[in-house]
Image (cartoon, helix red, strand yellow):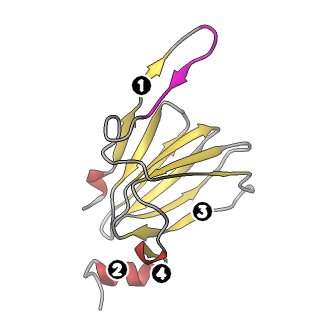
Amino acid sequence: MGIQNCHFIDLPRIQDPRGNLTFIESERHIPFEIKRVYYLYDVPGGAERGGHAHKNLSQLIVAMSGSFDVVLDDGHHRHRFHLNRSYYGLYICPMIWRQLDNFSSGSVCMVLASNYYEEDDYYRDYREYQKALGLIR
């Protein structure tokens, strides 16, 4: 799988003068069952998050507030995505290296995951990730 399989997903949006509403349903709006939800907040200026890939996990990343960038790398190509709206998310398939940076003040990053936390699912070393892809020995 490569970066071409990662893409923005428009989420349902109900607009109302009293405030807008967006919702996400497992396997209906996103291509997986949601097993875990977590969020990043109070990220200090200049800090980076992520810096890993998942062997089997799929994710949807949503900027709930503020903005940030997600840099995806499949070992051959690298692409930067800017997230700044709560009514779309970035779908990331397995075996894609991701780095989050450029967090605005007060930003909140919500992540929906296809599986429960499992440390064995992570590549935390980029060289090990490249080896798994067969790019280096």
Q: Amino acid at mark 2?
A: Gln
If you read the primary sequence from the N terminus, does the residue marked by circle 4 or circle 3 appear first?
3
Q: Position of residue 122 (x, y in %)?
A: 44, 73
What is the crowding at mark 1: few (fewer than 14 residues within 10 Å), some, or many (at least 20)?
A: some
Q: CA distance from mark 1 to mark 3?
A: 28 Å
If you read the primary sequence from the N terminus, does the residue marked by circle 2 or circle 4 appear first?
4
Question: Which one is in front in this view, the residue at disc 1 or the one at disc 2?
Answer: 1
Q: Is 38 above or below relative to 108?
A: below
Q: Is 68 above or below relative to 137?
A: above
Q: Amino acid at mark 3?
A: Arg
Q: Start and end of the magenta stretch?
A: 17-24
Q: Position of residue 99 (x, y in %)?
A: 51, 62
Nearer the observer, 114 or 64 = 114
Per the image, the residue denoted by label 4 is 125
If you read the primary sequence from the N terminus, does the residue marked by circle 1 or circle 4 appear first?
1
Q: Quadrant of residue 94?
A: bottom left
Nearer the observer, 56 or 76 = 56
Q: CA distance from mark 2 to mark 4?
A: 9 Å
Per the image, the residue denoted by label 3 is 49
Q: Which mark is residue 39?
A: none
Q: CA distance from mark 4 to mark 3?
A: 14 Å
Per the image, the residue denoted by label 2 is 130
